[in-house]
Image (tube, helix red, strand yellow):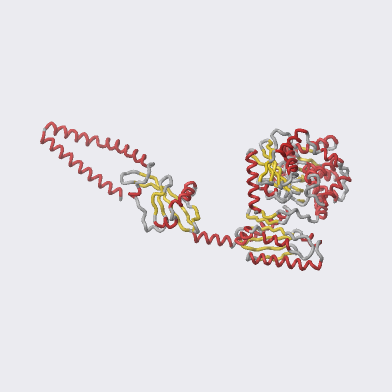
Amino acid sequence: MEQKKETKQNLWRSILGSAVAVLLVVLCLMIDIGLGCGAIVGLLGGFFLRPMLRELIGDTSAQQGDDQRFLDTAVLRENFSIPQNLTLPYAVLDIRGHILMYNKPFTEVFPNISDADEIIEKLRKNSNAKEGEIIPIGERYFQAALNHCEVVEESGAVGDVLTLILTDVTKTCVLEQQIQERETVVGMILLDNYDDVLDSIDENRLPILSALIDRKFNQIAAFADGVIKKLEKDRYIFLLSKGSLEKFREKKFEPFNEIKEISVGEHIPVTISMGIGIGGSSLETAMQNAKAAVDLALGRGGDQVLIKDGEKYLFFGGKSAEIHRNARIRARVKADALMELMADASDILVMGHKQADLDSLGSCIGVYAMAKSIGKKCNIVMDKISVGVERLCEKMQESGKYHGVIIDGVDAMRLISDKTLLIIVDTHRESMVDSRQILMAAKKVVVFDHHRKSTDFIEDAVLIYHEPYASSTSELITEMIQHMDKKLKLQQVEADALLAGITVDTKNFCIKTGAMTFESAAFLRRNGADSIRVRLLFQNDMDAYKAKATVVRDAELYRDSIAISVCPSGIKNATLIVAQAADDLMNVTGIQASFVCCDMNNIIYISARSFGEINVQRIMEKLGGGGHLTVSGAQLQDCTIEQAKERIRTAIEEYLEEEA
């Protein structure tokens, strides 16, 4: 329409111009013949040169139009209007995002127009703004779409503008939210110290205790508008909606802690572990996730709740010490299973974690002694001998009985066959093994560990002996040695190595010690271990001792009860120093937790300690590490010491906020 109008206007201009030119020529001829002839010549010249002039003028106009494309389009307010009967909230903006005009429905959404600036800025930064984005505004939800448009003025100028369209999708969003809230999730509940409770209570009071527990569970189910049914004497299944699960999350699952308060006389408190699985539209997937979550909860020591949603885990609780569960029976069963696997293997490889400590190497040596006792070839895989185990490796070499036992990953890869048995000790995480390549190549894998279970655990192992109650992996290996059918006589170095592993992880029998810990130490002592020789393995040189003292002296207090410090650079055995300094800081009055870090080869190593009031394992897990309630650690890459300290503070704040 505009094009036809413009063509008609141009035609009238041409006719008018021609008439004026003819009139001027006639007047010139009447005045003077020479002047008239000149006017005719000029008119003819203009007629023939007109196309060339039009082309030149046209190029200039086009250039001016291109220039005006980037000019402010405020002139639109006079030449452009939005239909007021448009029901959708609609606004026109300039290319910088400033609102030029809007309709009445837009003012109903934004009574104060400046409130739209934040949403407009968000849409401008979003690459999917054209397709639209769901944005909450007050109690309503809108799909907001931002598009570029060109507007052509009557003068021919072209300007770029943005259009903002809001579509009310509140009903759709509310329905989707209601569907999600009503999705059924599955919980598996385990009374994880049921056997210990049985031993501590009179038989005639057991039915009363069981009835009180069932009654409490029924009250919880009524609160959640769900169902809890007993499957076995110590196992329950819990069905509830996702919306009810959010209520429990807000309360930190506090109603379940009331189970501990149930009492029918003198007995130990009942603790529970619960795994909750979210499986989308599939109840089968939800059940599988619930089973995996409760297994992980038990692997982390019990007395806690885990939620598994796809590959994501959420942790609640976990403040109690690990639950001791039939240690002797399990040790005997695992020992028998290990002997069968060793007997069927052509050769055996045993491997610990990166930056091996005395517990890792001591466990490897214990497994080596078991394999040697049944005549099987066994090698310990260690790519690099760390400072913490140098003295023990020297003792092995001095004995002359362990030549070629320790090999690197390259040599180990040459030995692997389909019948090779790989035994992983002192870690259950794929990312922490000394050589991940060997783990991937092995067909049969066995895992022995005592750390609280993490989410990236080694899967498809043919045998797993994972007991977070144990002080150390060396204790687990010692237990199995005691239950071997063929009595094993340990060499002096082997007994010392296992005792050193127990000593280092218990901090000289001060942390995480149980009856089995001292019984294992006594067994090792009877087999030739000597506490003095073990003590010598922990000695530091003067420079290292001064460095440790510096770390303790320079520690800074965070939140008045948490110590954070840094090991000086250039120290040879920095990782050992930070662990010892973290232990020493716990001897200071008022310190509830300590975090010490060092920089080695562009990797930040962190050692964390506590007495249990603060769960350092959960703090270190936020940094990609793990460990125990009271002893944990992590490794950070691509960051400086100051950045590592800031990340530690952030992780502490997140943990304290979760516990609040």
At a point 60% along the width and 61% down the height, the residue shown is 243
Residue 493 lies in what quarter of the image? top right
Q: Nearer the viewer, residue 290 or 517?
A: 517
State which quadrant residue 587 falls in: top right
So how many labels did they put on this image? 0
Query: Residue 144, position in %: x, y?
Result: 47, 53
The image quadrant of residue 595 is top right
Residue sticking out furthest to the top: 34
Q: Is residue 217 left or right of residue 378?
A: left
Does residue 281 appear to the left or right of 1 in the view shown? right
- Which quadrant would the C terminus be assigned to in this image? bottom right
Residue at (88, 43) in percent of width and height: 528
> Front-most of 21 and 568?
568
- Residue 419 seen in the figure: no
Q: Position of residue 197 (x, y in %)?
A: 78, 61
Viewer-proximal residue among 75 and 451: 75
Residue 361 placement (x, y as % from top left): 78, 41
Specify whether residue 500 is in view: yes
The percent position of residue 199, horizontal first and vertical second, equals: 81, 61
Vertical side of 510 occupied by 240: above or below: below
Name the side, left or right, on which 659 lies relative to 405: left
Looking at the image, residue 196 lies above or below residue 457: below
Which is nearer the eye, 354 or 616? 616
